[in-house]
């Protein structure tokens, strides 16, 4: 099975640390390490790497890399020891995401939960000869079993947009779905990393935080709004526009995940590329409207599912690497943050075994005039969405 996934790997130096908030400043920064790769599973479930590369960007240790350089081909034993649960696994995102996570060599157990049609999805997926054991769960009675001893919970449950809708139009239905699922996560896997995909992310993440607080198990380091798709889109659109090798392109995207709250930082991208003002405007608007572009093309049949599954799988894989002890994992995510005056903000974060170890605060320094204006313009909308989520979670306490 050959797949092409990309690893974003950057190096930063920790500048200041405190118990609750780390600030990371970029000092030396390598280009993204994005290696297309070939991977095979043999009959013992050992992985056979064809190149100096790995599944979904799983980073091979230096020792392994040296060995691989010498032999060009080597069988590695990878410890499949992490348990992942997907809530909303039978949906448009849930199904391809489940497949991508089923391919991960780091996952021992894959728990699929949905209110409908999940049995067939799990039966189908379970025939793939990759390490993880797949189990299906449905209905409230099975949710707690689904969530026992889970390391990462991914939540794509909820309704998608139709043309003409904003993400905020999904609030009334999805807020309740996220609330009830996060309550179950709090009761059954309070130490898990939680990845929220359900829109509107700018509100559903604050809802999740409030629910976890009410349950007395909130750990700000382990709650993530998944904004990886914005980065994936930015990398793709910029590489196309400037005729760059995709493997080299790394565009940080900050703020939130809706309209103007999505702020790509073209001045901070790698490689260092110059843009005309028109190019900056055109690219920024396209990245901000990427979701709408797909919603309109699907013409009522939903929103991005395949690219979202790809992006979410990349984020899960990064967190698995962090849990597995990789100390060099950076991704953009919407997290509780002190990088601005807003309580939640998407930026690059360093992820470790215990979750967010710090935010890359230097990304907000030295912004272009266009980015500075964009940053100020997004704050009002993002603040409103965060407050709406917090108010919802606390209204019936
Ligand atoms: N964060 C992002 O970048 C991003 C990108 C794309 C889509 N999304 C959002 O992801 C969500 C899902 O999109 P989709 O296209 O997969 O939708 P979908 O309708 O295809 O799938 C949603 C799934 O959730 C299930 N579900 C509903 N209520 C549930 C509950 N209480 N418990 C468990 N499962 C439940 C449904 O049965 C369905 O299988 C939407 O809210 C969409 O806006 C976010
Ligand atoms: O646009 C949407 O509604 C789905 C998602 O948030 C996206 O960015 O594709």
Image (cartoon, helix red, strand yellow):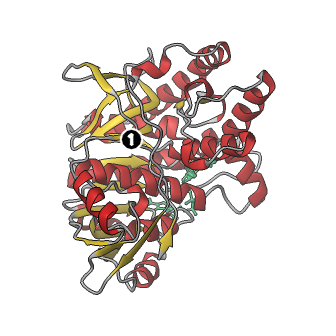
The image quadrant where one finds the C terminus is top left
Q: At 43% across and 19% down in the image, what residue appears? A: 362
Question: Quick check: 279 left or right of 271?
Answer: right
Question: Quick check: 263 left or right of 113?
Answer: right
Residue with the mark numbered 1: 224
Q: Is residue 191 above or below residue 299?
A: above
Q: Is residue 80 above or below residue 309?
A: below
Residue 255 appears in the rendering: no
Which quadrant of the figure has residue 213?
top left
Q: Position of residue 77 (x, y in %)?
A: 22, 70
Circle 1 packing at 10 Å, graded few (<14), some (14-19), many (20+), is: many
Comparing 274 with 221, the one in front is 274
Q: Total number of numbered labels? A: 1
Q: Position of residue 244 (x, y in %)?
A: 66, 43
Q: Position of residue 130 (x, y in %)?
A: 34, 78
Q: At 27% across and 47% down in the image, what residue appears? A: 322
Which quadrant of the figure has residue 219?
top left
Q: Is residue 251 above or below residue 247?
A: above
Question: Quick check: 178 left or right of 320?
Answer: right
Residue 231 appears in the rendering: yes
């Amino acid at each position: 099975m050959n797949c092409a996934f990309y690893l974003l790997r950057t190096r930063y130096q920790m500048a200041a640390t405190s118990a609750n908030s780390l600030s990371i400043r970029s000092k030396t920064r390598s280009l993204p390490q994005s290696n297309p790769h070939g991977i095979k599973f043999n009959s013992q479930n050992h992985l056979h790497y064809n190149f100096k590369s790995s599944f979904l960007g799983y980073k091979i240790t230096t020792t392994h890399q040296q060995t691989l350089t010498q032999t060009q081909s080597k069988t590695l034993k990878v410890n499949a020891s992490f348990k992942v649960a997907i809530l909303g696994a039978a949906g448009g995102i849930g199904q391809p995401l489940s497949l991508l996570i089923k391919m991960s060599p780091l996952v021992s157990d894959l728990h699929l939960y949905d209110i409908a049609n999940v049995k067939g999805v799990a039966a189908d997926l379970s025939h793939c000869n990759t390490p993880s054991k797949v189990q299906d769960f449905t209905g409230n009675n099975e949710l707690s079993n689904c969530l026992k001893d889970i390391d990462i919970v991914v939540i794509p449950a909820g309704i998608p947009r139709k043309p003409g809708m904003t993400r905020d139009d999904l609030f009334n239905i999805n807020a309740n779905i996220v609330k009830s699922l996060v309550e179950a996560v709090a009761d059954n896997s309070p130490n898990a990393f939680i990845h929220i995909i359900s829109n509107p992310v700018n509100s559903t993440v604050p809802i999740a935080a409030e629910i976890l607080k009410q349950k007395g198990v909130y750990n700000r380091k382990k709650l993530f709004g998944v904004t990886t798709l914005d980065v994936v889109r930015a990398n793709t659109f910029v590489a196309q526009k400037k005729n760059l090798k995709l493997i080299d392109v790394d565009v940080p995207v900050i703020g939130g995940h809706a309209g103007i709250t999505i702020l790509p930082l073209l001045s901070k991208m790698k490689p260092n590329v110059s843009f005309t003002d028109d190019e900056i405007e055109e690219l920024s608007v396209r990245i901000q409207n990427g979701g709408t572009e797909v919603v309109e093309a699907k013409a009522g049949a939903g929103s991005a599912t395949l690219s979202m599954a790809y992006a979410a799988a990349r984020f899960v894989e990064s967190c698995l690497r962090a849990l597995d002890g990789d100390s060099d994992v950076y991704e953009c995510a919407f997290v509780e943050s002190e990088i601005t005056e807003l309580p939640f903000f998407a930026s690059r974060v360093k992820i470790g075994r215990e979750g967010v170890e710090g935010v890359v605060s230097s990304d907000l320094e030295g912004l272009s005039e266009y980015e500075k204006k964009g940053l100020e313009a997004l704050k009002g909308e993002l603040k409103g969405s965060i407050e709406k989520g917090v108010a919802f979670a606390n209204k019936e306490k």
